[in-house]
Amino acid sequence: MSLLAVEGLCKSFGGLRAVHDIGFEVAEGCIKAIIGPNGAGKTTLFNLIFGSSVPDGGRVTFAGGRLTTGRPHKQVAAGMARTFQHIRLFPQMSALENVMVGGHTRGRAGFLSGLFPLPRTHREERFIRDQALAAMRFLGIEALAGNDATQLAYGEQRSVELARALASKPKLLLLDEPASGLNMRETVELGKLIRRIRETGVTVLLVEHDMGLVMGISDEVMVLCQGQKIAEGVPLDIQKNPEVVRAYLGDEDA
């Protein structure tokens, strides 16, 4: 069953065609990777799916409903969460407070409840805190809860950002370059963690350059080159695809 369906997405910046007529599906319970050379349009595609960029054409359907473009909070409300290629944590906030931001996207307390705290508001805040701690515990970083998030080591900051995404209880998790800046050991642990996340019922779509990670954990791989899809299939088929090899290594006859 398809959780995410992308049809004919297009996006240009001036004369640059960043994404052109891309379509694909992500099955529920799948780990799907998007790969391609630098400048292939991978992050632009992520931004279009998440609603932080408006496409020139095409549509995104998630969990059976068409998503509103240009409004990421609608995607989060529908059950989508993401991490970023460049870490985006809130400064002067603890790791736990950063993770709780993800939980607040599921909160029901409104503006007036914040001005005039009621027992229900306090209960909800405790619940969000407990859920945030549970997400951190799942990732093995609960001990970092009280630390200033932006003063943590790079790998720990990545984990905090991931915990924040998980705290929103997503159906689909978008990971943009999750292994960026990690060493080999951390990348291996990341692969195990992504599988564990999938085992909890979360579907995963990731953009990644580390081919060892991609081929080791992905059920399906899609390849972009110059804004277009050039291949899609299981990892073994992608590794043998001559067009993919040319995209990465160049054509000797060129």
Image: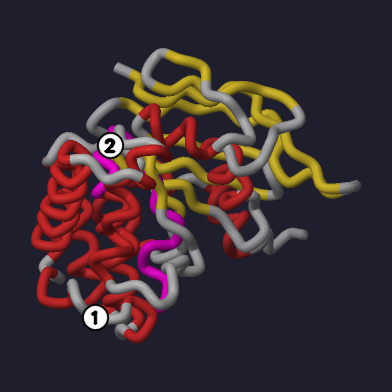
Tell me what residue is drawn at x 18 percent, y 46 percent.
122
On screen, 77 above or below 177? Answer: above
The magenta-colored residue range is 167-181
Q: Nearer the viewer, residue 46 or 146?
A: 146
Left or right: residue 178 versus residue 56 is left
> Is residue 169 rendered magenta in the image?
yes
On screen, 4 above or below 191? Answer: above
What is the x, y in percent for residue 47? Answer: 58, 45
Q: List the residue tagged with mark 2.
A: 203
Quarter of the figure with the C terminus? bottom right
- In the displayed orientation, state which residue is furthest to the front: 116
Residue 205 visible in this rendered orientation of the protein: yes
Left or right: residue 244 versus residue 57 is left
Tell me what residue is drawn at x 89 percent, y 47 percent.
14
User: Quarter-wise, where is residue 7 in the image?
Assistant: top right
Quarter of the figure with the N terminus? top left
What is the x, y in percent for residue 127? Answer: 14, 45
Q: List the residue tagged with mark 1.
A: 147
The secondary structure that most of the magenta stretch takes on is loop
Left or right: residue 113 versus residue 11 is left
On screen, 39 above or below 198? Answer: below
Name the amino acid, label 1. Answer: Asn
